């Protein structure tokens, strides 16, 4: 078998790029945001911060907060027909109304 080349973030150049107005320092309000169990959130990787990132396949998906572990939140989402749990730092989450 062939060994895997690269890291977790390979082939994500276009996926993680930000608009030029969004670049710069991290937003502290987003870093320290509090979420409750049952909140719907969008998963979007903030490429400024590597800690608490999830696997790039889930980028752009919507999930439900199902708990908290340390600083990160446990998000449950559906990947095709399987239900999966992802632990995500709040900087990579955005609360939705729907």
Image (cartoon, rainbow, N blue to C red):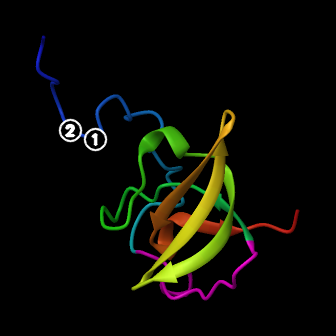
Q: How would you rate the neighbour count of disc 1 (Cα within 10 Å): few for under 14, some for 14-19, many for 20 or more?
A: few
Count of number-bearing discs: 2
Q: Residue furthest top?
A: 1
Q: Residue furthest right?
A: 98
**Residue 66: x, y in percent?**
64, 73
Residue at coordinates 69% horizontally, 81% vertically from top-left? 37
Q: Residue furthest front?
A: 82
Q: Secondary structure at mark 1?
A: loop
> How far apart are the alpha carbons under marks 2 and 1?
4 Å
Q: Residue 58 appears in which quarter of the rendering? A: top right
Is the residue 30 above or below the residue 88 in the image? Answer: below
Split into 4 quadrants, where in the image is the N terminus? top left
Residue at coordinates 37% horizontally, 34% vertically from top-left? 13
Residue matched to label 1:
8
* Secondary structure that dominates the magenta span: loop
Q: Residue 95 appears in which quarter of the rendering? A: bottom right
Residue at coordinates 11% horizontally, 20% vertically from top-left? 3
Is the residue 1 above or below the residue 57 in the image? Answer: above
Residue at coordinates 35% horizontally, 62% vertically from top-left? 48
Q: Secondary structure at mark 2?
A: loop
Residue extent of the magenta highlight: 26-39
Label pair 2/1, CB-CB below 8 angstroms: yes
**Residue 4: x, y in percent?**
17, 24
Is the residue 94 above or below the residue 3 in the image? Answer: below
Viewer-proximal residue among 88 and 23 = 88
| Residue 34 horizontal side relative to residue 15, left or right | right
Residue matched to label 2:
7
What number is the disc on residue 19?
Answer: none
Q: How would you rate the neighbour count of disc 2 (Cα within 10 Å): few for under 14, some for 14-19, many for 20 or more?
A: few
Q: Is residue 2 on the magenta stretch?
A: no
Split into 4 quadrants, where in the image is the C terminus? bottom right
Viewer-proximal residue among 58 and 9 = 58
């Amino acid at each position: 078998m062939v060994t895997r080349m690269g890291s977790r973030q390979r082939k994500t150049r276009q996926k993680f790029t930000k608009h030029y107005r969004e670049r710069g320092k991290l937003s502290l309000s987003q870093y320290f945001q509090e979420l409750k169990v049952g909140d719907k959130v969008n998963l979007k990787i903030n490429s400024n911060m590597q800690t608490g990132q999830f696997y790039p396949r889930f980028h752009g998906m919507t999930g439900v907060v199902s708990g908290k572990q340390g600083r990160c939140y446990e998000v449950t989402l559906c990947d095709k027909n399987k239900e999966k749990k992802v632990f995500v730092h709040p900087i990579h989450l955005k609360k939705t109304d729907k």
